[in-house]
Amino acid sequence: MDIEHIRNFCIIAHIDHGKSTLADRLLEITHTLTSKQMQSQVLDDMDLERERGITIKSHPIQMEYTHSDGIEYVLNLIDTPGHVDFTYEVSRSLAACEGAILLVDATQGVEAQTVSNAYLAIDTNLTIIPIINKIDALKVTGDIKSVSNQVVDLLGCSLEEILNISAKEGTGVQDVLNAIVDIIPPPEMPGGKGTRALIFDSTFDQFRGVVPYVRIFDGFLEKGMTTQYFAKSGSHEITEVGVLKLDKKPVGRLVAGDVGYVVTNIKNVSEISVGDTLTVKSNLADKPLPGYQPIKPMVFSGMYPIDSKDYEDLRQSLEKLQLNDGALSFEPNTSTALGFGFRCGFLGPLHMEIVQERLEREFGMNLITTCPNVSYIVKTKDGESIQINNPTDMPESGGIDTILEPCIKAEIIVPAEFIGAIMNLCTIKRAKYLSTHYLAKDKVQLNYNIPLGEIIYDFFEKLKSITHGYASFDYELIKSQPGDLVKLDIRLAGDVVDALSIIIHRKNAYKQGASLCRKLKEEIHRQQFEIPIQASIGSKIISRETVRAFRKNVTAKCYGGDITRKRKLLEKQKSGKKRMKQLGIVELPQEAFLAVLKIDDD
């Protein structure tokens, strides 16, 4: 295929604006799939994606389209996620493309992730095709003018450049295909020396090992060649190359401009990394492609196998998942309460939730997940700076000078009627107000600086609840700021449970400590001995609840007689319970760790 007749593009949008539905229509019109293969959201092939109705992974697929001028074109489409936690997936997809379709819901208008993804595409120098989707859902056709003006303000394009379509009904989708061919430029002609292919994603196949997905920029790849990499040492023989239809389809050669896969029978997942440049020994390149910026996790949580024998299985599962999810990081960790496990880093709370579910479903792991927290910088009185990813690593309060907490610049787009409710929520979350900007008569953009630690528990749920689902939320990390923070410990029977420790603002400590003790009292099973549950800051106890012991009526067999006989039996029972309290072990159910997430802090 002539490089002039190749188009590499992706679809970017806010959540639920119709990316996957538009992809379905494009696959249908180009006859890429048979009617038997065709189903709703066909590229969302993960169970979690179909259940939640969101895209989690980017999905590449190749289509063939004959333009009205009679020339056949190859279209490589990459469907991308819309949620803020998966922005990394979007940025990886953009690096493999020359153009992007920016999709906007006609009933919702420009939303937070629409803005974020548009800026990502502009920064990557992609050609953008603006499209307004769901015109079939408009009850008042005049609404489309307001949405069109929002798109013009965002991109600086003209009204004539915007396409109006209904992906659900197929209206205007043919115009989209023509625009892809006419507006998006073909890949640049190869200019570098040697073969260079960007590894933009990879999967693990049980029989073939690691299978990298690549975009060829220079040279070609074919069976029998020996690969080399810039970021990793080692080399492997190519046993198969191919393009990505719904399944993998082998071809003889991948050339510059192509998007496809390479099979090299790599068994060890650590031998390859996403963002690396692949080259071949017979045509070595002298410099790598730009690749990706390293990702910094923002939310951390401990993951421990319920059965300690599954520790190695959990390690292997995380390594395989990391291959397919470059934003996941992990390192070994030990907890006195939970044993051996891993401290994992995520891009956000939804990312953490998805990783946990994938480990349980795809790899059959039974896990206990600890309360999520963010990364803090502690400056000691000795002038030392320590990064704290785990509350148990927090130094004693006497040696701390300042604690810096990460902050975000939040952009909330919401109907004007909910401004008061949003401002109230943000005040509770210690947010600093920045500005208000009216996008339309009844649509407002609110900007706040919020500590990241305040949004990782229940912020998204409360935001959606108070706005009846109409709010959209996007954020970017800004510099850390000093905060009056303390470590809140939970003690069971006098011993600190390290897995339940959290770092919170001092003014919320008493309320959250009391709430957490009450929650734990409901979850911890009663024993033969009394269990005190205490919340403490350092050595100071700030709240206490008690799980009462089971009590056997040892005096039931006494019918009358001297009172000293009953007292003797009760004293004997009391001393037995005291001894049991010293030796007994409190078993913590998984619900006890989830109780931290359910603290009602209103």
Image: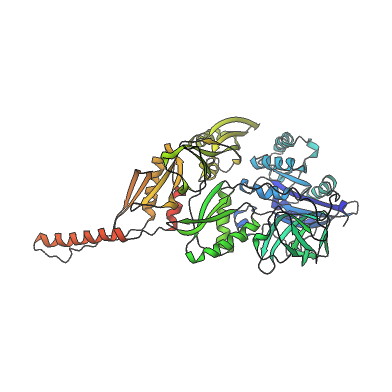
Q: Is residue 275 above or below residue 479?
A: below
Note whether residue 453 is visible.
yes
Q: Quadrant of residue 35?
A: bottom right
In this picture, residue 540 sits left or right of residue 237: left
Q: What's the colour scheme?
A: rainbow
Quadrant of the drawing holding the N terminus: bottom right
Q: Residue furthest front?
A: 382
In this picture, residue 159 sits left or right of residue 87: right
Looking at the picture, tell me which residue is in the foreground, 94 or 485.
Answer: 485
Note whether residue 465 is visible.
no
Query: Residue 227: x, y in percent?
Result: 76, 61
Q: Is residue 562 above or below residue 89?
A: below
Query: Residue 416: x, y in percent?
Result: 59, 33
Query: Residue 501: x, y in percent?
Result: 43, 48
Looking at the picture, tell me which residue is in the foreground, 412 or 37.
Answer: 412
Looking at the picture, tell me which residue is in the foreground, 387 or 57.
Answer: 387
Residue at position x 80%, y 57% in the image? 63
Looking at the picture, tell me which residue is in the foreground, 19 or 270.
Answer: 270
Residue at position x 50%, y 58% in the image? 341
Q: Quadrant of residue 116?
A: top right
